[in-house]
Amino acid sequence: MSGISFRNVTKRYGKTVAVANASFDIQAGEFFCFFGPPLSGKSTILKLILGLETPDEGEVLIDGQPVNHVSPAARNVAMVFQNLALFPHMTAGDNVRFPLVERRVAEPKIRERVDAVAAKLHIGHLLHKPPSQLSGGERQRVAIARALVRDPIAYLMDDPISALDARLREETRVELKRIQRDLGQTLIYVTHDQEEAMSVADRMAILEHGEIRQIGTPVEIYDAPVSRYVAQLLGAPMINIMAATTGERVEAAQGTILLPRDRTPTGTARIGIRPEDLKVEPWRADHEGKPATVFEVEPLGGYTVVTLDTGSEKLRALMRGQPQVQLDSAVALSCNPAKIHFFDQAGGALGR
Ligand SMILES: Nc1ncnc2c1ncn2[C@@H]1O[C@H](COP(=O)(O)OP(=O)(O)OP(=O)(O)O)[C@@H](O)[C@H]1O
């Protein structure tokens, strides 16, 4: 089995470089996510895969074959429309059969395909209903069935659940992941929501200004971001970034966090500590360095976000449960040195 690849693909709109020299390989069966801020080129990548746009440079490959000059209809990749838009005046079943009717496929073949897809997605009992009588999850399955009825090599989704409220988004993404796993079919997915990307993707590509900055599993990228930009995109609250100076020890945030020097790569300009790795303790006389002050406490039930003022920077710590942290009290900050990310002046990662 093979998948979908870009080889040094560039796409420009006038002076705007929407996709810059992008290369990646999406494996067959993968849930692959493109994640980045608005206007970073995510939708353009989908259009290049679908054949709605042609690269200015480079090559798009589907199943190992160059497809730059293959029409969208002949590419056999299917789009699941934004908001999972189903035709409201048709039953779920007619929605699913629609792509085949449109292509004038013979009726027995249509019935065979619709039955097969409906069985895979467990929607056989819903086919007689109009979309208005389906739950959100059921509509999602029907919309996916409509994309899969043509038996595509891959199906694509462009921010499909961004319009839902937060709770429904959480439920829907779990459902979506489960469906994809059961189907075992390649899903290429665009989102601008970091939590959604991390929760659903087998692997993801991080975009900035049309360039792919990093590709990997969510955990690989979270633990070993290639740059400060990537580190800051993943994780909530955002990673703490602070200036670091080397002395007897590395000091960060006005000497509030003291780190052993031997671990610090040369060229370190900044360090990053994830909120869950920042340790907060009441200040004691035997603590070294300087105390920080508790600036704000946000008790969120299962965990608490504590904002700390070091005098030069505000840092955030994520603590389990509801720790007793006194507002305005002096605290000592520390971190397991193995958890510290080092960045050079340009924002490139120097490892951990
Ligand atoms: N048809 C077009 N004509 C001109 N410029 C375009 C066109 N489509 C995209 N662009 C530009 O290309 C860049 C990438 O856009 P794209 O829509 O791919 O980003 P995106 O990451 O999907 O953004 P969003 O998250 O806002 O949907 C942007 O600067 C955008 O303005």
Image (cartoon, rainbow, N blue to C red):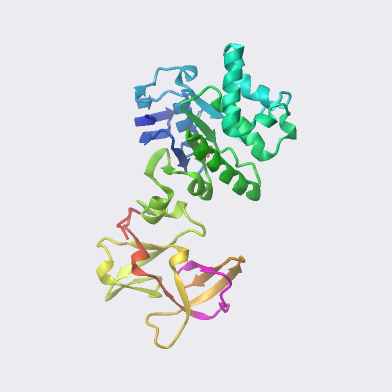
The residue that appears at 67% across and 22% down in the rendered structure is 94
Q: Does residue 314 belong to the magenta stretch? A: yes
* Residue 140 can be seen in this image: yes
Tell me the magenta residue range: 313-330
The residue that appears at 58% across and 11% down in the rendered structure is 106
Residue 87, compared with residue 346, is above or below; it is above
Quadrant in which the C terminus is drawn = bottom left
The residue that appears at 45% across and 72% down in the rendered structure is 279
Residue 137, compared with residue 149, is above or below; it is below
Determine the image quadrant of residue 121.
top right
Residue 55, image x, y percentages: 40, 25
Front residue of 296 and 214 = 214
Residue 162, image x, y percentages: 60, 42
Left or right of 210, for residue 296 = right
Determine the image quadrant of residue 335.
bottom left
Residue 160, image x, y percentages: 58, 37
Badge count: 0
Residue 326, image x, y percentages: 57, 79
* Residue 229 can be seen in this image: no
Quadrant in which the N terminus is drawn = top left
Left or right of 304, for residue 36 = left
The residue that appears at 27% across and 74% down in the rendered structure is 247
